[in-house]
Amino acid sequence: MILNTENNFSSLDQAKMLVHETEGWRLAPVIDWMFSPEAKTLEPDKLIQGCIDKFMEVGAPINRLRYSVWSIHPQLALYYLIWTKKSGKVETIEIPHGVRETSAFIGSPAEAITTTRKPHRYRLEDLDLEKEHPIFKELYEQGVTDYLGIPLLSASGEVHVMFISTDKRPGFSDQDITKLIRFSDFLQPKMEVLSMHRLSVELLNTYLGKRTSHQVLGGQIKRGDGELIEAALWYCDLRDFTPLSETLSTDELLDTLNTYFELVFDAVDAYGGEVLSFIGDAMLAVFPKETAGTIANACNAALNAAEEAFASLAVFNQQRLEEGKPEIKFGVGLHEGTVIYGNVGAPSRLDFTVMGPAVNRTARLESLTKTTGSPLLMSKDFVGLVDRETMSRGFHTMKGIEEPQEVFTLLSCENC
């Protein structure tokens, strides 16, 4: 049933006045808490949990609350916060793209509320559960008697949804419904701010990396802001990209690139590294000493990540060969040193990256993998810090470096 919610209140005081004059549990303490110093948080789940705790204190007949937020994220369509009386805590659930095309959404209360932008109330005992969306039967079996869905209109025009249910019989009273809808009016602006902050963090993590996004959000945003860090350095590059780009369709090329980057990223991430940038078909990453504890730990982590990346790619290549597709090959250069980690660029377009001779030498090492026949090359400084058997691949000249440099590879590496 679609609800009529034409009554509007111009201020918090007016809303409280209504609540104080009604029977039953009081909404005012919940609203008071929402705007108190205790409710100051950047985490949506903590705000919802605090509201729930207050609802329980005032005796609100609630046994389940779900707050769904559509998101802008390369992997997620939305996330929702859910609390049940049984669990007693708020959990965050993330939903991947494509959910709008699934049976879980089509014909559901969420679709109805998103489409009409109106509150809906469902008395479960009045429904023919065999003809309704499966969610109603699931809720009925959990003891739910009444189910209220409230649209939450964001500033961007997106419709988020909050569902609140009760196991009280015969269900919510009219006063309960009025209070819960009024509660949503005060909750929505605060949740929108927190959701935008969460979105900002997630997008910065995705496009900059977790360490760099933390620096940016921490205020290190002016051109020239930076610091010196000691780290193991990684530079890798895809082999034979030009022939691939000329023989594969656009979709196949993008799919191949994304799979390659995903395999390499997962290996780097698993060992505490951070990818700083994708440069065409190349990738720059760091394994900071600060994260690893010692520079030796950082170098060993980078080497372990390289072995894992080569192993993962070997599995992927086997699949490609079985499909009659060419293998994907790449080279990795590993070095260590102190680098400048900070902001560079034009005043209105900045990049947060690492700079310095050590970075250049890492890229030069990777370039030598093309001529030495060794897909993995390490500097003498790097090799001196790892606990693996290595072998020299001779002395080689590097652009910008006067003296020929000795480079090394692993003595034994099944896939590299």
Image (tube, rainbow, N blue to C red):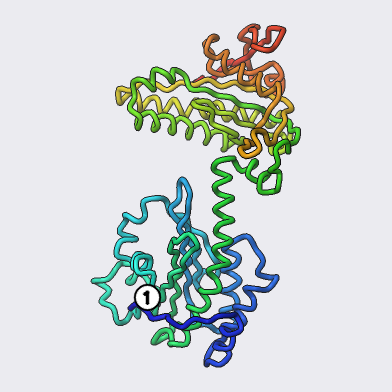
* Drawn side of residue 113 relative to residue 75, left or right: left
Q: Which residue is drawn at 27% across and 74% down?
A: 129
Is residue 153 positioned above or below 359 on the image? below
The mark tally for this picture is 1
Q: Which residue is drawn at 57% across and 15% down?
A: 367
Q: Which of 263 and 276 is in front in this view?
A: 276
Tell me the quadrant of the picture where the N terminus can be found: bottom left
Q: Which residue is drawn at 55% across and 71% down?
A: 187
Query: The residue under label 1 is which amino acid type?
Result: His
View extreme (right): residue: 228
Q: Which residue is drawn at 44% across and 61% down?
A: 158
Q: Which of 222 and 72 is in front in this view?
A: 222
- Residue 168 is situated, as x and y percent measured from the top left of the image, at 44, 84
SS of the residue under disc 1: strand
Q: Which of 93 and 229 is in front in this view?
A: 229
Q: Quadrant of residue 328?
A: top left
- Residue 162 is situated, as x and y percent measured from the top left of the image, at 46, 69
Please rate how many residues cluster around mark 1, counting C-alpha atoms within 10 Å: few if below 14, some from 14 to 19, many from 20.
Answer: many
* Drawn side of residue 269 relative to residue 124, left or right: right
View extreme (left): residue: 131
- Residue 128 is situated, as x and y percent measured from the top left of the image, at 25, 76
Q: Which of 146 and 413 is in front in this view?
A: 146
Q: Residue tagged by mark 1?
A: 120
